[in-house]
Amino acid sequence: MNIVLLSGGSGKRLWPLSNDIRSRQFIKIFKTGDGEYESMVQRVYRQIRSADPDARVTIATSRAQVSTIHGQIGEDVGICVEPCRKDTFPAMALAAAYLHEAAGISEEETVVFCPVDPYVEKEYFELFAEMDKLAAKEDAGLVLMGIAPSYPSEKYGYILPADREKMTRGVAFWEKPDVETAKDLIGRGALWNGGVFAFQLKYMLKKAHELLDFEDYEDLYGKYETLQAISFDRAVAEKEENIQIVRFDGPWKDLGTWNTLTEAMEENSVGDATLNPACENVHVVNELDVPVLCMGLKNVVVSASPEGILVSDKEQSSYIKPYVDQMDQRIMFAEKSWGSFRVLDVEDESMTIKVTLNPGCSMNYHSHERRDEVWTVISGEGRTIVDGMEQPVQAGDVVTMQAGCRHTIIADTELKVMEVQLGKEISVHDKRKYELEN
């Protein structure tokens, strides 16, 4: 089975833990059986592999998220890079062209598209197999998962089934109706459209060529920034007459806000936090190396990270996006395929970063034209390569690189390094990559 996970958006409603690099699906907040924490994308990927170990999984995402994806779930996953955010229809069209031309998947094969961040259990993904079988039929059009609604939401599209059978025909579609209309639809048996679609690859390619002007995958990629941002629901689903529905009656949550996210947390705090007995319905997520103390709070979420600190009434936390949009702040923490970095201090002509490299991993071989760098190894063992010269390093060693110098560091064990950048113009764009000669 071919599965495409749609991993778009910056998740600003979960600030300060989410940013353009670490969207909400990468926040490690769900406790696993071994006491560790996993993110939404790790949880979903694990559940997919449990339901179908042989599934071919591709993630459609922005370039900024690729390194984080590889860091969290490994290299055994396909990546379709979107040049920019253009909503779900362009993303699905690009992914379909990628699967057919870059991954070599036949137009006759079926594919299931799914959001990367639903909070569900294994039976949700087991239903993909039934959707896949329906989509494989010769006369199949669009197969959609209909989710039994728990309240009249304005956030989701609705699909009216022909009857209440588990598998049936869809007769009408509404995209995000008002509350009163939603109440009426639920009374008539309508289901939520949870954004899970299955079809033969040729179906999506045909729709893409009908609605977009492009020749092939490379042409579509090149024109991507000029495309209209539009959802698959509005572009295709609302107009499709041949819709089959597979009904899902199990638990399903969209964890897009702090209010809904904390409902899924198994404990009231993650990180160093203390809540006194007078607190009621309070959740804390603390990524800082300082304690957080809550006294007598009620219905409050507290989140602390290098990006900032949020203290909010849970209901009001759904409305933070306009305020976050007004903030202009550099990325202070990010996970990469090789490890992670955290900005500790920023001055006019210097920046201090703590870098953690995973065993066997390394940075790109690169140089900077407008800044010097000093690395101080805090712990672990590894090797540096500076202008082609390799040297072993361990705790206490200091390595200095002047502007224009080519350099990288390789971790033999987990390696922690304090990096100090010095220069009048420190920018993420001041980086030139090179091939490392053997």
Image: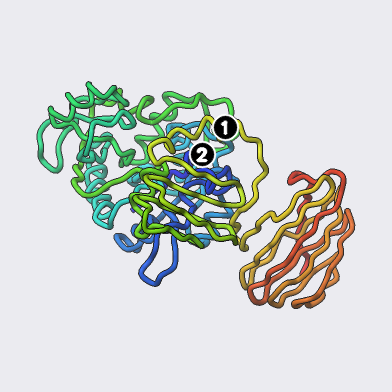
Residue 325 circle label:
1
Do residues under tags 2 and 1 come within 8 Å of each other at their CB atoms? yes
Question: Could you say whether the residue bearing mark 1 is in a helix, strand or loop?
Answer: helix
Res 158 seen here: yes
In the picture, measured across the screen, residue 17 lies left or right of residue 385, that is left
- Comparing 327 with 369, the one in front is 327
The location of residue 49, given as percent across then percent down, is 36, 61
Residue occupying image coordinates x 46% and y 41%? 312
Q: Amino acid at mark 1?
A: Asp
Residue occupying image coordinates x 69% and y 61%? 354
Q: Is residue 90 above or below residue 254?
A: above
Q: Is residue 25 above or below residue 162?
A: below
Q: From the image, which quarter does the C terminus lie in?
A: bottom right
Q: Name the residue carrying label 2.
A: 12
The location of residue 47, given as percent across then percent down, is 34, 59
The location of residue 176, given as percent across then percent down, is 32, 26
Residue 48 circle label:
none
For the residues labelled 2 and 1, the Cα–Cα distance comes to 8 Å
Rendering quarter of residue 16:
top right
Q: Amino acid at mark 2?
A: Lys
In the picture, measured across the screen, residue 199 lies left or right of residue 373, that is left
Res 139 seen here: no
Rendering quarter of residue 196:
top left
